Image (cartoon, rainbow, N blue to C red):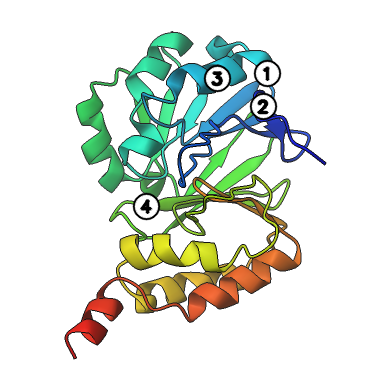
Amino acid sequence: MKIDFNGPIAATREIYWVGYFDKKSNLHCNPYLIIDEPDIIFIDPGSIPHFPIVMRKVLELVNPEDITYIVAQHQDPDVCGNLAVVEDIIGHNELQIVAHSYCIRLIRHLGLRSKFYPVDKHDYFLALKSGRRLEFMFTPYLHSPGAIVTYDTKTKSLFTSDIFAAISANWSLFAEGDFLSVMDPYHQIYMPSNRILKQCMERFDKMDIERILPQHGSILEGEQIKLAIEHLKALPCGIDLFEEAFA
């Protein structure tokens, strides 16, 4: 089935991709909305260049003034470079920016007015008004010292930011074909070592996950999740490759 990337795309009944499909790029950014009224959560809202298209898709789904939380899983400009502009569009004083303290220390330099919600000061969870629970896992150095991932306990969906990211000229929003090898370049460039990556994969392996939604690359579901975890457990990356080069 052909997917229309011009509008928001549902991953579940309550989770939507609102990203920008750039035909000229091999690296696609994937912001997501969780609609759990009265709360609306905007995850990794993206960059300034992508802002007009991302916000148009958000507007097709919700009134931006109803967004209550923005989750910034790390501080890279492609993840949250548009935060100040998004904050202006949302335009209310109750908005909270959810991130790790190590990340907040850096993104506050974007000149934000909103209150921060440091996950490490709140036992790594956020309880929504409906009772739905978002849980956060600290994933340091993958690839930021303040990186986190977000687990939606209701749908068993794991938002992984740069983990499971892929670089591909033949991108698809939902993984298909050879979805494993296209993960290699990104992880080998941006992740510091297999030791750190493997430890993270072992933690994911113990979780009950039905889908993985990365900030780059493709959404993984079902058996794809186990295959991707096993693949990355064994992938040399970062300093491992330098050690091989200079051995």
> Circle 4 sits in a helix, a strand or a loop, which is it?
loop
Amino acid at dot 4: Ala
- The answer to whether residue 202 is seen in the rendering is no
Q: Which mark is residue 74?
A: none
Compute the Cα span from label 4 to label 1: 28 Å
Provide residue 162's location: percent of width, then percent of height: 44, 53
Q: Which mark is residue 8?
A: 2
Residue at image coords 58%, 67%: 180
User: Mark 2 and 1 residues: CB-CB less than 8 Å, in contact?
Assistant: yes
Compute the Cα span from label 1 to label 3: 11 Å
Provide residue 21's location: percent of width, then percent of height: 56, 34
Instruction: Using the image, determine if residue 84 lies above or below residue 77.
Output: above
Compute the Cα span from label 2 to label 1: 8 Å
Q: Quadrant of the C terminus?
A: bottom left
Residue neighbourhood size for the residue with mark 4, other residues' Cα within 10 Å, grouped as few (<14), some (14–19), many (≥20): many
Q: Along the polypeptide, which appears first: circle 4 or circle 3?
A: 3
Q: Which mark is residue 147?
A: 4
Instruction: Using the image, determine if residue 202 lies above or below residue 150.
Output: below
Q: Nearer the viewer, mark 1 or mark 3?
A: 1
Say left or right for 100 vs 178.
left
Q: Nearer the viewer, mark 2 or mark 1?
A: 2
Q: Nearer the viewer, mark 2 or mark 3?
A: 2
